[in-house]
Image: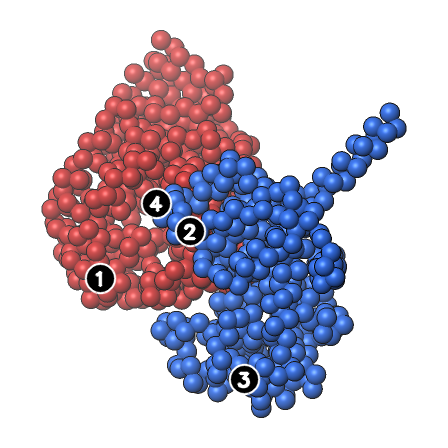
Chain colours: A red, B blue
Amino acid sequence: MKTILKNGRILDPSQDLDMVGSLVLEDDQIVEYGNDVQADDADEVFDCTGLWITPGLVDPHVHLREPGHEYKETIVTGTQAAAAGGFTTICCMPNTDPPLDNPALVDFILDRSASPEAGGVFVAPVGAITRGMNGLHLSDLAALKKAGIVAASDEDFPIQNASVMSNAMEFCVQLDLPVMAHCEDRSLTEDGSMNEGAVSSMLGLKGMPRSAEEIAVMRNCLLSLHTGCQLHIMRVSTWGAVEMIRQAKYLGAPVTCDVSPCHFVFTDEMVGEFDTNFKTLPPLRTQVDIDILLQALNDGTIDCIASAHSPHAGHEVQAPFEEAPFGTVGIESVVGVTLTYLTHAGILTPLQTIDKLSTSPARILRLEAGTLKPGETPVAQVTVIDPELQWTFDVHKTFSKGKNTPFHGMSLKGKSVLTFCGSEIYRDAYFDEARYQSLD
Amino acid sequence: MRRNLLGIRQLDPRDIEDLLAQAADFKKLIIKGKSVQTLNRHVVGMLFFENSTRTRVSFEQAANYLGLRTANFASQASSMTKGETLKDTILTLRYERLNGLVMRHRQSGAPSLAARYFGGPVLNAGDGQHEHPTQALADALTITERKGGLKGLVVAIIGDVDHSRVARSNAWLLSKVGAEVRFVGPRTLMPSHTGMLPGQVFYDLSAGIADADVLMCLRLQKERMDSGLLSSVGEYAKLYQVNRDTVRLAKKDCLVMHPGPINRGIELDDVAADSDYSAISNQVENGIFVRMAALKYCFGDDETKQTEKSSKGKAKA
C-alpha cells in the first residue's frame, strides 16, 4: 500500500523544514518526501495543494478518565477524539480511579488504547508521583517507568509538601523521568473557584490568587534547579509565572512549560453570569496575562501547547459555579483555536505552530513522535491541516463524551483534516473528497 | 410580563424607582387596611437551602398580603439531602406546576442556574456572597422615607464587605440612583479587587464615615476569626464599631442601619442601635412591602390586563 500526500506545504520543525512538496507513505512508514518523489506506483493520492503536511500532533495533557470515570470519557472515545483533533500521540493523566500508581494500570491503559475499537493513536501514560495521589508516599516509580510511563505527575492534586516534591524529583533524576507539575499552593486557593480579581469580587465568588500559582511555580523551579530534575510546568496562566519560568531557564534549570488554549483566549470576565464552561484550572486570568502569554509563546519561553482535555458529564457542569468541576474539553478544538488566535494573528509562524503542537512536546517527553524523518517514529505519524478552512466548532459533533467547552459555536479558521498513524485513522467531513484519488 | 429578580446589578435605575414606588404604595394600602390580593392565582415555592428566619417570614408575610399561596421547601427535609442535583430539584418543582420560586442558597449564582431550568420567575432571596436584592430594596425604602430621597446621599457600608451579599446589592442600588457609596472595613474583609464594584474603599472608620448620611453596619460572622482574617473581636470592635463616640463623626442627622441579626457590642453598641439614629426596625418592616413589590415585579400584572382587554374585545364584537 503506497500513499502519496501530494503538493502540500511540508512543515517539520524537527529539521527546520518548510517546503512545498509531496510525502510518500508505504505500508505503515514514511519512506520519503520532497519535490521529486517516486509517485508512479501509488495506490492512493491525496492532493494537498494549499494544505499543511506536518508530523502527527502530540498532546502532553489529556484526561482519558478510564478506569473509574467512564461516564466522563473512555480510552476509546478519548483516543477517537484525539485522532479527530489531528493528534497521533497523547499523554494521559493519572487522576483516574484508582489513580495510575501501579504497573498493572499502565498495562491496562496501553492494552485498551491499542485495541481495534480505539482511535489508533499512541497513548503515553503519566504515572502518579505519590500512592493514590495522596501527596505523601512515593509510588513505585521504577516499576511504573518499566511499565511504560513517560513522566510522573500528581496533576490536579499538586504535592503541597516541598520535602515530598524534593524527594520525588531526586528519584526521578535517578530514573531519568520528567516530572510534570500543575502549580498551585492549595493553602491560598481553598474554596476558590475562579481568578481572584475584580470579577470574583463582583460575583461574590472566592478567588484563587495568582500568587498561589506563582509560589508553586517558583518552588518547583527551585527544586528542579537544585536537584537537576527535568520539570515540565503544566498550563501556565499568569504573567508572573511566565517570568519565574523565564528566570529559571536563564539560571539553567531543566524547566519547560505549556499553555492551554483557554488561557490565551479568554479572561475571567467571560465567567459572566456564572457560566461553568469557563471554570478552568488554573482559573482564567486577565488581559495583561494573555498579552504576556502570547509574547512568551512567540519568544519560546512557553515551549508547547496542551489541550488540557478534561471531559465532564453534563450533570456535573450544570451545577452552581462553586460546585462544578474544573476543566474543559479541548482536544478537538485546539488546532482550530491555535491557528485562529496564534498563527493567523501573527503570534506564531506556521513552523513555530507545529513545533508547539508536535515536535516540542515530543522532545520534552522523549516520545517517538514529532518528526517526519523516515524511521524515527515506530510508524508514520502525519497530520494534514487545512490552514484556511473556515468552520464553526460544534461540540455536539465531537467524539469526546465531554461537552463542556467555552469554544462551542465559535467561528475558527484552520482545522486538521487527515490523520495518519501507521495508516489513515481519521478523515474529516470537511476534507474535500475531490482531492482524493484511489488508483487501485 | 414574567421576569426574574436575580440581583440589583442587572436592574435599570428606572426599575429600582418603580419597585420602591410600588413598595411605598403597598405600604400605604396595607396600613389603611386595604386588600391587595392581586396575585391569588399563583403558587410560589419557598426554597430556603440556607437557614433564614427573618427573610423567610418577611416573604411569607408579603405573599399573604398579596393572596399568593406558598409551598414550603425546607432543604433538610428535601431530596437534596438524598443526593439530587440542584438542576433536578428545580425541574421537579417546575413540573409540580409551581408558578414562581423564592430562593436562598449558600452558593453565589445558584438562583441564576435555577432560572435557567425553572421556566418561571425566580426571585433571589440571597445567594452566597453575591446578592440579596430585597434587602437592598428594604434599605433603600427606609432611607427614602427618613431622608426624603436617595440621590446625593453619602452611604458608608461598614464591616465585612467581602463576605456580604447585602453590601454588594446595596452598593449597586445606591450607586444606580445617584448616592455615593463608601466601603469601610479592614483589608482582610474587603474584596480583593473593588474595580468592578461601585464604591470607594476606606480602611479607616473615621475617614470613611466622615459626613456620611447613612451608616450601614454589616454583621460580623464569628468564623472570620477562625479563618485568620481578624485577630480578635475586641480589636475589630475598637477599630470599626459604630457607637456613641464614632457616630458623631457622621452627619448630625445620620441614620444607623443594620440588616440583622446584630452582634451587639461588636459592630454596634446599644446607644447607636437604639437611639433616634437607628432605622433598624423600619428596615425589618419595610422588608415586607419591598418583597410584595418584588413579587409583583416578577409575576407582573399582565394577566388581569389581558382579561380586561379580551372582555373589551368581546364587547366590541
Looking at the image, is mark 4 or mark 3 nearer the viewer?
A: 3
Name which residue lies at 27% across and 63% down.
A160
Q: Label 4 sits on what residue type? A: Lys
**Sequence-first disc among 2 and 3:** 2
- Say left or right for A288 vs A403: right
Q: Mark 2 touching mark 3, by CB under 8 A?
A: no
Q: Is residue A437 above or below residue B106?
A: above
Q: Which residue is mark 3?
A: B270
2 and 3 marks on the same chain: yes
Q: Residue at x 38, y 60 (%)?
A: A191
How dense is the environment of label 1, judged by Cα within 10 Å: few (below 14), some, or many (20 and up)?
A: many
Separation of disc 2 and disc 3 at Cα?
35 Å
Q: Position of residue A251 (x, y in %)?
A: 31, 66
Q: Which label lies toward us, 3 or 1?
A: 3
Residue where numbered disc 1 is placed: A165
Q: Position of residue B278 (x, y in %)?
A: 62, 79
Q: What element does badge 4 sit on? A: helix
**Disc 2 from disc 1: Cα separation:** 43 Å
The answer to whether B281 appears left or right of A257 in the picture is right
Chain letter for mark 4: B
| Residue at the spot of label 4 | B82
Mark 1 to mark 4 CA distance (whole Å):
39 Å
**Residue that extends furthest to the top in the rendered view of this protein:** A440
Q: Nearer the viewer, residue A261 or B148?
A: B148
Q: Which mark is residue B75?
A: 2
